[in-house]
């Protein structure tokens, strides 16, 4: 695919600024690779990606083959003539993943590929993701869905609810951003509906949910899976109730958690919150994904106690607080996640620390001050 070359005034300004500030800031990933390819390779060996990756190490119980998959999430693409920064930041993530050696087994896309679910946005995103060398597994976000209720997304990427097995792990991908109908009675147009959902912190919509149909599907899907098999669930919204006011919330999370309860080892990887976010509820470990587009602030209440907060990002650097990542499946029964924020050192959240309820392996704090 031909890379977009359209540059807005903002982009040109930011590029000039980035260039001028480069000597004073962190060395960027490409520069890092140029001067220290060997160090980067060594870092990869230990699940530590230079700069732009977030390795999560997940392994449970019985010995099985370890592996790594990458993920990219929440790119919120507009048409590039409107905003090419978000396009460039998704391209940066794709370049980062393609530079991995060895390559990840697959790449999870975590949802919110588009900003308003429009054809030009989703097709642009699909074309960029086609540049990934590794196979791509897609998850849907609310920004992809509510313009046409998933019609175009499905035509591009297939059904949003599915499962697969990979090297001893059972993976489930859910569409967790369904909402009860708030639009028909109010006679909203599709775009009004989309913008209402995209508003996030308005009071005009309902909460996200997995819904009864998917919960029944999940029960059936898991029925033949032994309880000793590690289960990894991908959901766009967090599968717990964090902060209703911003829809950092899944209304039927308790029911979904109950379905997952019989498994000894469950890890949920979610998008939507655009920030470092860690939680543990019973047998389930939760890890949020960073966005490639922008970092959300933390909700004013409900922050899970195991979360290491990333500091308030640099307002003059729109990539600060963003990132992408990888997920590593290890054979030792523990899930580790490294948040490799762009512009900051990676932050590791280990499964052992969650297992010990934060008493061991405390993650290092961000290496930059809050702005
Ligand atoms: Fe998002
Ligand atoms: Fe979202």
Image (cartoon, rainbow, N blue to C red):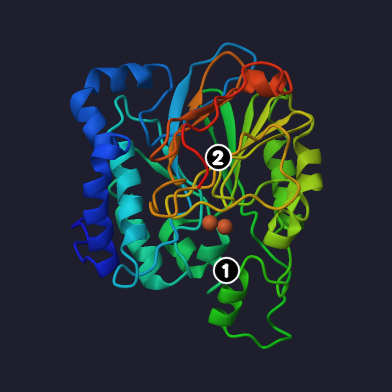
Query: Alpha-carbon distance for marks 2 and 1?
Result: 24 Å
Q: SS at mark 1?
A: helix
Q: Can residue 133 be seen in this snapshot?
A: no
Mark 2 neighbour class, 10 Å CA radius: few under 14, some 14 to 19, many 20 or more: many
Q: Is mark 1 within 8 Å of ligand 2?
A: no
Quarter of the image for residue 185 reads bottom right
Residue 366 place in picture, x, y as percent: 51, 33
Residue 249 place in picture, x, y as percent: 72, 54
Which residue lies at the image location 72% right of the left edge and 39% below the top edge?
304
Residue 328 place in picture, x, y as percent: 48, 26
Q: Residue furthest top?
A: 63
Q: Which mark is residue 310?
A: 2
Left or right: 67, with 271 as reference point:
left
Look at mark 1 in the image and give the residue it sits on. 198
Viewer-closest of 20 and 268: 20
Viewer-closest of 309 and 97: 309
Mark 1 neighbour class, 10 Å CA radius: few under 14, some 14 to 19, many 20 or more: some
Residue 26 place in picture, x, y as percent: 32, 35
Which residue lies at the image location 33% right of the left edge and 60% below the top edge?
85
Which residue lies at the image location 48% right of the left edge and 48% below the top edge?
313
Q: SS at mark 2?
A: loop
Q: Can residue 96 be seen in this snapshot?
A: yes
Quarter of the image for residue 356 reads top right
Left or right: 323, with 214 as reference point:
left
Viewer-closest of 303 and 73: 303
């Amino acid at each position: 695919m031909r890379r977009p070359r359209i540059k807005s005034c903002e982009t040109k300004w930011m590029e000039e600024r980035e260039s001028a500030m480069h000597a004073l800031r962190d060395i960027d990933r490409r520069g890092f690779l140029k001067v220290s390819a060997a160090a980067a390779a060594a870092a990869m060996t230990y699940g530590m990606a230079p700069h732009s990756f977030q390795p999560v190490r997940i392994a449970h119980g019985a010995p099985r083959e370890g592996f790594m998959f990458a993920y990219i999430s929440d790119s919120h693409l507009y048409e590039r003539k409107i905003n090419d920064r978000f396009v460039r930041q998704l391209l940066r993530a794709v370049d980062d993943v393609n530079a991995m050696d060895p390559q990840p087994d697959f790449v999870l896309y975590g949802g919110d590929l588009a900003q308003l679910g429009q054809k030009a946005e989703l097709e642009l995103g699909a074309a960029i993701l086609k540049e990934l060398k590794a196979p791509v597994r897609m998850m849907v976000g609310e920004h992809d869905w509510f313009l046409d209720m998933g019609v175009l997304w499905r035509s591009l990427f297939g059904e949003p609810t599915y499962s697969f097995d990979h090297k001893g792990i059972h993976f489930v991908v859910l569409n967790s951003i369904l909402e009860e109908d708030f639009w028909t009675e109010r006679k909203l147009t599709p775009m009004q509906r989309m913008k209402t959902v995209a508003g996030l912190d308005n009071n005009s919509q309902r909460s996200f949910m997995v819904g009864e149909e998917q919960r029944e599907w999940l029960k059936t899907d898991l029925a033949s899976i032994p309880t000793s098999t590690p289960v990894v669930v991908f959901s766009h919204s967090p599968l717990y109730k964090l902060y209703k006011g911003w829809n950092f919330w899944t209304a039927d999370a308790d029911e979904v958690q109950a379905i997952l309860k019989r498994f000894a080892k469950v890890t949920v990887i979610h998008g939507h919150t655009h920030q470092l976010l860690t939680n543990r509820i019973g047998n389930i470990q939760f890890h949020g994904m960073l966005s490639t587009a922008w970092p959300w602030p933390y909700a004013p209440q409900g922050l899970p106690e195991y979360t290491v907060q990333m500091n308030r990002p640099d307002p003059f650097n729109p990539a600060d607080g963003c990132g992408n990542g990888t997920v590593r499946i290890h054979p030792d029964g523990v899930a580790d996640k490294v948040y490799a924020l762009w512009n900051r050192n990676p932050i590791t959240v280990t499964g052992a620390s969650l297992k010990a309820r934060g008493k061991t392996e405390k993650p290092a704090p961000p290496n930059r001050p809050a702005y």
